[in-house]
Amino acid sequence: MTIKLKKRLTNLAFLLPALLLFGTMVVLPFISGAKISFTDWDGFSEVYNFVGMKNYLKIFKDPTIGEPIKNSLFFTAVTVIGNNLFGLLLAMALKKNTRVNRIFRTFVFMPFIISLVLTGFIWSYIYSDVFYELLGIKSLLGNKKTVMLGICIMGMWRDIGYAMLIYLAGLNAISDTYYEAAEIDGAGPFTKFRYVTLPMIAPAMTINITLFLGWGLKVFDYAMTVTHGGPGRASETFALYVYNYTFPYNKAGYGQAAAIVMMAAIVVITGIVTFFLRRREVDL
Amino acid sequence: MKKKMAVMLSAAMAAGLLGGTSVQASEGEEVTVTIFHHIEEQSSRDGMEEVCKALEEKYPGVKYELQGLDNSQYDNMLKTKLAGGDAPDVILGTPKRYIELINAGHIQDITDQEFLKDFDPDLIESMKIDGKVYSVPYSGDGMGVFYNKKVFEDNGIEIPKTHEEMMAAAQKIQDTGIYAFARGFQDGWPAQCEIQADLYGTFLEENPDFFEKIAVGEKKFADYPGFKEVMERTAERLSFESGDEFGTDAAKARAMLINGKAGMFIGGTWDVTEFINAGADNEIGFFALPGNTEGNAVLGIAPAGCYMVTSASEHKEEAIHFIEFLTSDEGVAIMSKYAAFVPFQAGDDTADMSPLIKDWVSIIEEGNYYNYESREIFVGQQNSTFRTWQEEFAADEERNVDEYIEKLDEQFAAID
């Protein structure tokens, strides 16, 4: 056995478990879901019929699809902007490696460790018990107009720590010589930020923005566990729409078609955004 | 040496992962009947355990295994299990609610069973789909008004028999500085009780084919003036303030009623056990929601505690024994030891009953009830849409009844 072949086989052996897992957990269900999306299966019957593109056409004609799309986009916009803005600000504020800063950074990052479901539970109690008792504000989750905002706050509380971490890494990679050179040229703090910091953290921004974009468009856990899409359908995100059709409404075929459309939309949106962000990146 | 250790340890870890799988008892003739349910109260689950033990003594060689899940996941898991070929032998569910599973051929009919003769023929009729019987109940589910007896006494309020009387009572209670109604809508679905406690009574009794006609598109919600009246009464009830409704959960709402911070609470049979467990069943009473102007409130009650046998079951006979035993006098006696429940039909023995349950039973004994699952009900997307609409109605402070009914008809028209 040549060394090259041995190396190849070793690499393959390490990849194999992950590949198998990915294959069975992601690829197989995806293929089977794609097949189901062309039928009228209700999720439990033994028989179902092939209906071609009917499900896909119905998606574009469904009047109730506007709200879930709007909710997902609202959540994505607020969290992408919010997480990045606050993550960057916190990263810049806590950049120095002092003990106090390190403690603060830990506190900011801790919420990220809890699961999404637990975050939802904690916040639903904060909204119901703390907000009303202390501030007299009725739970944000109980009102059609404020429920998505309530969910955004939950998401940001959890994810800002993560954004901050990535930005910290990005900021620390900027060599001080750039700042010194800028100061010599007479740059003030804002100019330094605009012409040194921003361009140099472009890779960190790409990571953060694309990540939160993907997470935001796929948001499901908060809507499902905390509000069940309520009140009414005010917090129904697109992922919850897919779930509703696949399970409680007994229209698995249509639900799968919606899932595939959702996947295509996410790929397109994140693809476009990543393309433009990548162009901004400075080659160090 | 180190390498060998590493390989052995990893192999041991991998083997340890396999330890989680169960080994099937393939020796002997022991038969296992799996019972899939979504009962959440621990006391009821304990009762079921004893029922199974008693059954195992009666039929040696048969094991009855309970598999419990929480309410929200039950339907999805059930469908997944049926579709995946892992069907349980017995499932908890009423025929009308799971009519789609029955029509898909997943449920075994028990029409020719001997023990069905002990039941009221009208009840058996309501358990039929297309002339075949699929289950029998041992308890009833319903919704109505729980009230704090002291609050009523102190303010000289009599149990309201009409909607007007109820609104007057609510106003009187509110004027004393406490909430007229306690509401715990945090989980979303309790908000549906506000509408259903009214809808399932007099209105459904007078319009028994309401769900059927709308489901097939023959009629619309706007075609029923009685439905508009139900929604108008609900809007009036909801107009009484009760704090942060969607930020309060059911347990807190019940506590508000018990502590006298509210006068009334619209809830269901599931709240009865909670009141009894809180030791408040002498202070809390129950009356049916007045849904008419005649003065006799009709309580909507539906069969509950219904179990059905799946057609994929390999032990159908043993599975049917479970249903037979549970609904027999012996089974009912065991269950009532553990958790209080409202019987579906008036029995004879009311001596040991909690006063709160007596309130329910006396309504049934007087015949002022209507089985709201005696005819077809909404299923699937229509069911979800109607329920979501109810929650939206309760959440909206403005609640224009006409606009809402129009919106509901539009949403139904969009479902195909």
Image: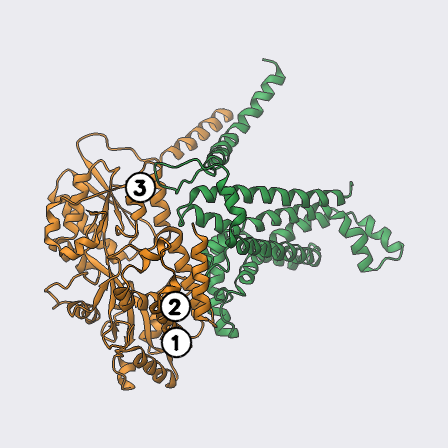
Q: Is residue B84 visible?
A: yes
User: Considering depth in this image, is B44 or B19 the residue closer to the camera?
Assistant: B44
Rendered image: mark on residue B184: 2
Q: Give how far across and how far down residue B98 sits, in percent.
A: 30, 49
Q: Give how far across and how far down residue A122 sits, in percent.
A: 48, 60
Question: Label 2: few (<14), some or many (≥20) within 10 Å?
Answer: many
Q: Which residue is mark 1?
A: B236
Q: Give how far across and how far down residue B366 sits, in percent.
A: 16, 70
Chain hosting mark 3: B
Rendered image: mark on residue B310: none
Q: Nearer the viewer, mark 2 or mark 3?
A: 3
Residue in the picture at 56% in, 23% down: A10
Question: Label 1: few (<14), some or many (≥20) within 10 Å?
Answer: few
Q: Give how far across and how far down residue B308 sits, in percent.
A: 23, 47
Q: Is residue B247 visible?
A: no
Residue in the picture at 39% in, 46% down: A250
Q: Nearer the viewer, mark 2 or mark 1?
A: 1
Determine whether, in the image, residue B348 is placed left or right of residue A270.
left
Q: Are marks 2 and 1 on the same chain?
A: yes
Rendered image: mark on residue B104: 3
Determine whether, in the image, residue B225 is placed left or right of residue A9.
left
Determine whether, in the image, residue A131 is placed left or right of residue A90.
left
Amino acid at circle 3: Ala
> Mark 3: which secondary structure?
loop
